[in-house]
Amino acid sequence: MTEIPAAGAEPAPATGGSAAAEPSESAESPGPVRSRARLTGAVLIQAITQGSSAVITILAIFLALVVGGVLIVLSDPVVTRAWSSFFADPGYALAQTWDSLSFAYSQMFEGAILNPATISAAVHGGSIAAIFYPLSSTCAEATPLILTGLAVAIAFRAGLFNIGAAGQWVGGAIVATWLGFGVSLPPVIHIVVCVIGAFVGGAVIGWFVGLLKARTGAHEVIVTIMLNYVMYDLLSYLLSHPAMLQEPGQTNEIAPFVANDADLGHVGGPPPQAGVGFLIAVAAALAVAWLLSRTTTGFQFRTVGASPSAARTAGIKVERSWILVMLLAGGLAGLSAATVVQGTNTQLTFNSYGTYGPDGITVALLGRARPIGVVLAGLLFGALHVGGTYVEAATLGQVPADIVQVLEGLIVLFVAAPALIRAVFRLRATTGTGMEAVAKGWNG
Amino acid sequence: MTTLTEAVRTPLTANRRYAAAITFCVLGLIDICLFGALAFAHSGDASFVLSQSGSGIHIPTIRVPAASACFALGGVTIGLGALRAVKELGQLGRRLTIAAVLLCLMLALLCWADAGVIALNVITIMQGTLTAAIPLILGALAGCLCERSGVINIAIEGQLLFGAFTAAIVASAFGGLWAGLVAGSLGGGLVGVLLAVFAISFLMDQIVLGVVLNVLALGMTDYLYDRLMATNPNYNTGVTFGNIKIPLLSDIPVIGPIFFDSTVFLYITYIALIVIQVALFHSRWGLRVRAVGEHPTAADTVGIRVLWTRYRNVILGGLLAGIGGAFLTIGSVGTFEPDISSGFGYIALAALIFGRWTPLGSLVAALLFGFCLELALVLPTVNPVLPPPIMNMAPYVATIIAVAGLVGRVRAPSADGKPYVKA
């Protein structure tokens, strides 16, 4: 990597527009290829100047951080006061702006990735495990996001838009919780039964959507949205009756704790650190990747996603693929619930479903509906969530954790609009390196 | 694999006639076996009040034996199902039977819920239905404007939410309700502008874009709520519009209090509904919009400015949905809360599709939703046996049944969701 001409590789994300002029000159003069290093350099420069998908993603994250930074600065009273007297003391205004921004983002980094203080503490005899605490929390936070992201992504690949990961999550959570406290089984078997139960609970909801689409043509977007609300209400009903799922003696909508022998084990440490759930998420991603790229079923999914009519003509049972892919998607969302109710918070409440469903959509979009991309996107969003909570605590609420949601929206917005990124950073337009259409219109 | 004849057979939607007949019969059996039997167990009369206290003309309360009424309604429904099975009806006939069956279901539900308990005030329920339907109708109209011109609008939810926020903050900070209404509209319009720019100019995948804009609107309003409103109550005072009685019309018994005694938002909804329905299907403007949505290349060839039409419609839609958002704050509860739109935008989207991308169809669907939402609020107070969460499910279950059993495969405008690039 050291042989790469620095002009092309380094400044592109940092200085944006100004960087584009220099590398484009070197790329335009082809010249004889002298060494392998030179070739790698040329490929890299071309990737940067023309905006390969990885470069677009990095630039999109950078641009989102810039826009999010504007929001942080605008809502900081100290900074806005400094700017109101900008002409009296411009240096002060700029310094305050920089302080506000760098504090917010550095706190976010320390909370989610690495806190330098823990390294110096470890050098002076402190805990070495503490260094990895933020990363472990990020993995834990990413676990359910990766799984709901996969639930949306696998449906995308078969041409279906699964907005219903939230409802499928609830379906899995209900079954896992019930098996978790209502059934007593030997330790390891109990875990396995609960996880499988969660998969089945989610899969049933997904299967129903696929079945309706295949049999009646009901559009999956409407059915999944409606099923989300039905499942929320069902959860609320179950959690408000002690005969169902409510903890006896409670007036709140809360279920009993999942039995200890059904808890997924720890890997990084006790929650909020990563547990076995994270391994399940990674394994699920690998399984989905294998399914999509190495099996007949996966090939059929992708063919149906590319063109249902062509798939039908080729003899693929389109309806069967829809049902099967929605079943798997629901199951993945159910697994996401298992990692939460058996892992991070072992008690199901009405608010447990949180934003895993909607976040799954953004994670799947950022990961371009590819399993490995989904894992990376899930980790990024997990880091943002952990960092957001950390920065809110560190700034005593001055920077609310909601800023993270804005950042997530902006990142996906920019990633999905490569034309905008090219325009902002003056990259040369090419064809085919943008984000291919993952979602289909109403008419399929 | 399969043989070719099997492979090329048409999807199962060809049996729609029987699907509808079976759905009708199932709904009829629900009328009889569920509502009827439960009402029979209660063995009381259902009574409906048709006048408000203080109105000049008094209309006697209607009393019906609940169980018998449920049985009769179920019988009618099954009869209609049989009719659908044996006879191929025209479009109007099909729609009328659907409307009749849904009406029977609603009446049976009401009879059961009200059997032997205090009388239900029908006028209050109808007022509540219309009020609940306002944001849904405006949202669906916004979607209709966008999608008829060929831009998918999933961002209705975000437009409602942002409109609700800007309306509340402007109305509170400047004390002007009308300023709040305009600000709400502009807030929704801003989301509309983003939708237009990214979808039309940057050719972004429109379903992705809609979802992202909803995430952004939710994040922005949560963030601004925490930073501005939570710390400073002056920005969220909860001012609301009062009711305006239309002279003469509001004095008509039954109809007057339901349709002509409400906030300005209901009247805006009437006007928008009529104007858009007429303009889309009976004007040169509407013909052009629909041409752009169905076949932009052809429209371009005859000199219609495709991109300009789309920009204009998407932004108009945003402005309209913003008014719907403003209703959520300054038209009803007053104060803004995070995620106040709570899925109304998605329901409006469902209403739009259920209504086959027409304003009047969306109106029917939105009223159905509004009725279910209102029932979920009212019935548990009348009859405590009904658990509220189960009642809350009603509108969503009704949609699934309607979409799967009655509507089935719908056809969107052909170019809906496809960016137009001039060749």
Image: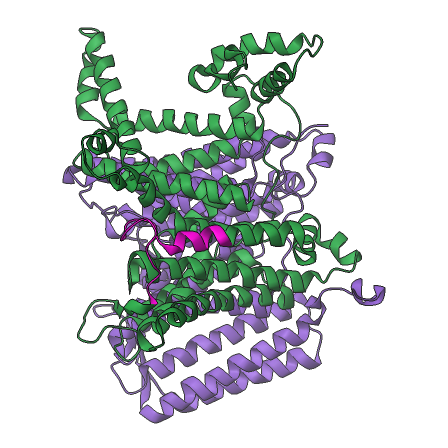
Res A45 → quadrant? top right
Residue A121 % position (x, y): 19, 32
Numbered label tally: 0
In the image, taking residue B212 as reference, residue A289 lies left or right, namely right
Horizontal relation, residue A412 to residue B258: left or right = right
Q: Is residue B232 magenta?
A: no
Colour convention of the picture: by chain
Which residue is at 69% across, 60% downward? A318
- Is residue B222 among the parts visible in the rendering? no
- Identity of the residue drawn at 57% across and 82% down: B25
Judge by depth and name the residue closer to the eye, A394 or B169. A394
Q: Position of residue B162 (x, y in %)?
A: 35, 40
> Which one is nearer the viewer's eye here, A103 or A354?
A103
In the picture, measured across the screen, residue A292 lies left or right of residue A361, that is right
Q: Which chain is purple?
A: B
Can residue A63 be seen at all in this image of the molecule? yes
> Height in image: A187 above or below B417?
below
Q: Position of residue B390 (x, y in %)?
A: 35, 72
Left or right placement of residue A217 versus residue A22 in this view: right
Hue used for the chain lettered A: green
Eyeballing the image, is A99 above or below A149? above
- Return the residue found at the far front: A125
State yes or no: residue A264 in magenta: yes
Residue drawn at x 62%, y 78% is B21
User: Bounds of the magenta span?
Assistant: A262-283
Residue B224's image quarter?
A: top left
